[in-house]
Amino acid sequence: MKIPLPSGRWRRRVSTSVLAAFILGIAFLAIFNTALDWTNREDFCLSCHEMENNVYREYQTTIHYTNRSGVRAVCADCHVPKEFLPKIIRKIKASGEVWHTLLGTIDTPEKFDAKRAQLAQNEWRRMKANDSRECRNCHDANAFDYSLQGYRATDRHMEALGNGQTCIDCHKGISHKLPAIDQGIGAANPASISVDVYRATETKPAAAQ
């Protein structure tokens, strides 16, 4: 029994449908990715007054906001992965923040400070688990020039790398005020501003420079 071949009209319809689906898929991905990028903007983050009135003001006093190189890390650089799949996962988890904004969970400085330790530890755990991935978007230990670092910073970096530590183990207070809790091994002292601040005030012995 001879099986009839599809007609030319049917083949054209299938080809048109496949092409249309392909074009729509590309358009969807482009729109979706644009939407993701839009939600990574600093202006979007600051549309929640909880961020603008609390962590953003703290961040403005740190080396990530103003520094001698003029390189500024915005919110998404530290809190959103660059890779597509991790970025999607992070966005899904962060959607819960919208719910807490509606509830007014941290809508005053007093409420925010009461939750500061919990919020900080959540973020530290996330960064510890991913080996400080967002830090490494800008910082590469293989590119360190130890001759330009302070004497103590050089020792700490080399020791940390040898012990398998990651950026967040020591740099917890680099962009935001530290909560008044035990920071754990390798962490900055809560009384200090950040590890990098005292680095700038140190000098190496002449033989080491």
Image (spheres, rainbow, N blue to C red):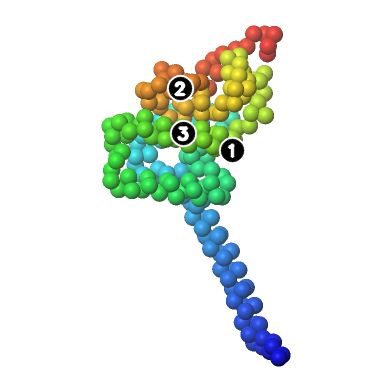
Q: Earlier in the sequence, mark 2 or mark 1?
A: 1
**18 sits to left or right of 49:** right
Residue at the spot 50% in from the left edge and 50% down from the top edge: 88
**103 sits to left or right of 92:** left
Query: Which quadrant, please, contains the C terminus?
Result: top right
Which residue is tagged 3? 125
Which residue is tagged 1? 137
Residue 62, above or below 156: below
Question: Where is residue 171 shown, x and y percent of the image?
Answer: 50, 26
Q: Name the secondary structure under disc 2.
A: loop
Query: Which quadrant, please, contains the N terminus?
Result: bottom right
What residue type is disc 1 on?
A: Asn
Image quadrant in which you'd find residue 25: bottom right
Observer-nearest of 102 and 53: 102
> How much space separates mark 2 and mark 1, taking CA atoms?
24 Å
Residue 43, above or below 113: below
Question: Where is residue 53 shown, x and y percent of the image?
Answer: 35, 36
What residue type is disc 3 on?
A: Arg
Question: Label 3 neighbourhood size at 10 Å, few (<14), some (14-19), many (20+)?
Answer: some
Residue at the spot 51% in from the left edge and 29% down from the top edge: 168
Question: Where is residue 163 shown, x and y percent of the image?
Answer: 60, 22
Marking on residue 184: 2
What residue type is disc 2 on?
A: Gly
Q: Earlier in the sequence, mark 3 or mark 2?
A: 3
Marking on residue 159: none
Q: Is residue 157 visible?
A: no
Which residue, as the protein is rendered here, is positioned at the far bottom?
A: 1
**91 sits to left or right of 112:** right
Q: Name the secondary structure under disc 3.
A: helix
